Image: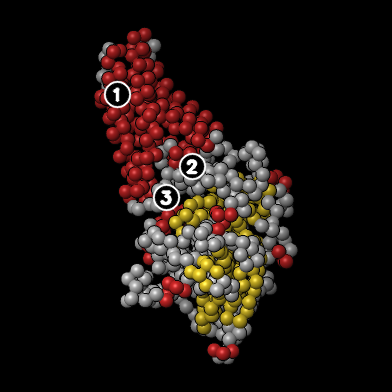
Amino acid sequence: MSPGGRTRWGFAAGLTLGLLAWELLWVRLLTGGAGPQVAELAAGLAWDATVFGVLGAVASGAVRPGPARAIPSQAARASLLFGLLLLPAAGARAVLQERWAADGKAKAAPGASLSALQVETSGDARFLCSIAAPGAGRPRASKGAGAVMWTGMRDALPLLAAVFPLALGVLGLQAWGRATGRLGRRSRWAAPGLLLVVLASGSGRLDGTKTVLGRPVSEEARLAAGCAPGAPVRTYALAAIAVDIPLNAHGDHVPKGRMYVLEQEIAAVRAQERRPVRERVSPGLGEDPIQPLVLRANLGECLVLSFTNRLAEEAAALQLDGLGVTVLEEAALEGFVPRMAIPAGQGLTYVVPLPGNAEAEGAYLLHDAEEARHEAYGLFGALVLEPAGSVFRDPGTGAPSSGAGWHALIDVPGGGQDFREAVLLSHAMGPPEEAEVRLEGGGLLPTVNEMAGAFRPGAFGFNYRSEPFFERERDPSKDPEAPGPRGSRGLATPMPRSYQGEAVKLRLLQAGSTEFHAYSLRGAGGRKGPADAAESVQLLRPGRGLTVSQGPEQAGDFIFHCRMPNHSIGGMQGIWRVLKGPEADLAPWAGRSGR
């Protein structure tokens, strides 16, 4: 190889090596050692090494062997060329990885416990800050490829600060080697060898205990946490994220929303955020990714929850009311107390030994008990304990499912009673001055003052959906700012569906602000006529749940709502639909009254 070729090759290799070390240093500083796992880190750095190597080879065209006094000018030219190439390359790479980030559904074998953690994709690992905290590099309110490209370019900016010093150092080292004869043929293996050492050592250091996405938990640790020997293990990996929560088809939304979400569903949540405003919700809630997280597990299992705080700056907590929890990383966060919030970008693994007694069946609240505003704006969910050995099935197809979602078919083994299940989480965002519910155009929904006091419509709802009465009563022909007709879409609030005669369990939980709700189901005990409509009323206390096993006896649509003044007209109401005949998208049980 000619002297010029060796100089350019050495420049590209040295610059690549230096930039990777710069990335590792920043990740170390930003996370305090709590970086991603080895596989994720290596994949991200391999991407970066490829890009840096190609761009470094192109930029090395500005480098020529020459006197020492020419080194600064050559380093400046090469750095400028490298930077001009890096920014569009970073943006293009971000767009490609956004396209490649795919979500999927976990599969289950009938009767078997499973992990709800899907194989991680590297869709969020772009440059620097995104490697430090996957998800941090995602635009807060993505508006298409342009926003994603800008995010990738932004994440690459910190690299530019190191390009000129590295170029200057590499060229200076090469000049010194030529002058002293120290850099001979054997040195051609130095850069690749050193690169492997840096990657190995950096990966080892950064495989910390704070971010533990799906890390296997040893049997010894599970037993120490209180799980029974041989208990089936069920694993979920979840995160706290910021999200723009859509409330209904009118465009009402909560731009500062928060939610718990399974790691593999984050891409689907961001995709729903990018939909046109009035197409962000499905009738009856459906399978929308933006909805409160509902997890299921069976009595007697050992539940492992790997929780990561993916909020940009705020601390977040995960508390599971009513069940004992063991935190594995007791030394990971200095001064950490279980149930307290953890900083952004960090995580913990919780082991929950689930009780085996049948009386423990029911719904338990997941929430952030440390920051009331987080819970009021959506940081809550549910864990439902089902009969031991149950298989969770998709309500639409009847196929085995992972157990996540607001409705499911519960296949109870042996002679147990199979049943259809729906989980409703009622929530309230507090008084008008705190409830930041906004119209499609960005303004706050108007305050309404009824006999029970002032409230903001949309601040009350079920499962992140709200249908305030005032919206539907406005006449578009007289009020140009009124929302258009809903047509056949139906309400956005959850619509449980079941077949007449089926065994049904409705799990109710109260989340959000500290208000009481009175759940009411009109016609639950059967009805003979409009004047004789029966009504079932259940009182929900803050943070508490209950199970309603008595559903409507006849076919038809039945209204459920909150009987508290202003809550129902503020949006907390929906429809339970009972069907006589089969529908294609709702799987029936073989025996509707059980087996």
Quarter residue 51 falls in: top left
Residue 318 visible within the image: no
User: Which residue appears at 55% of the width and 69% of the height?
Assistant: 453
Label 2's element? Answer: loop
Horizontal arrangement in the rendering, residue 237 relative to residue 283 (left or right): right
In this view, the residue farthest toward the top is 180
C-alpha gap between disc 3 and disc 1: 35 Å
Eye-nearest disc, 3 or 1:
3
Q: Do the residues labelled 3 and 2 touch (CB within 8 Å)?
A: no
User: Which residue appears at 63% of the width and 79% of the height?
Assistant: 536
C-alpha gap between disc 2 and disc 1: 32 Å
Task: Pinpoint residue 253: horizontal percent, then vertical percent.
Answer: 44, 61
User: Which residue appears at 64% of the width and 63% of the height?
Assistant: 542
- Neighbor class of circle 1 (other Cα within 10 Å; few <14, some 14-19, many 20+) is some
Q: Name the residue under label 1.
A: 76
Q: Which mark is residue 140?
A: 3
In the rendered view of the protein, which quadrant contains the N terminus?
top left
In the rendered view of the protein, which quadrant contains the C terminus?
bottom right
Task: Pinpoint residue 419: horizontal percent, then vertical percent.
Answer: 61, 73
**Mark 3 or mark 1: whose residue is earlier in sequence:** 1
Q: Which amino acid lies under the numbered mark 3 shown in the image of this protein?
A: Arg
87, 503: nearer the viewer:
87
Label 1's element? Answer: helix
C-alpha gap between disc 3 and disc 2: 14 Å
Q: Name the residue under label 2.
A: 133
User: Which residue appears at 55% of the width and 34% of the height?
Assistant: 33
141, 203: nearer the viewer:
141
Horizontal arrangement in the rendering, residue 114 relative to residue 282 (left or right): right
Task: Pinpoint residue 528: horizontal percent, then vertical percent.
Answer: 58, 91
Label 3's element? Answer: loop
Task: Pinpoint residue 257: horizontal percent, then vertical percent.
Answer: 49, 56
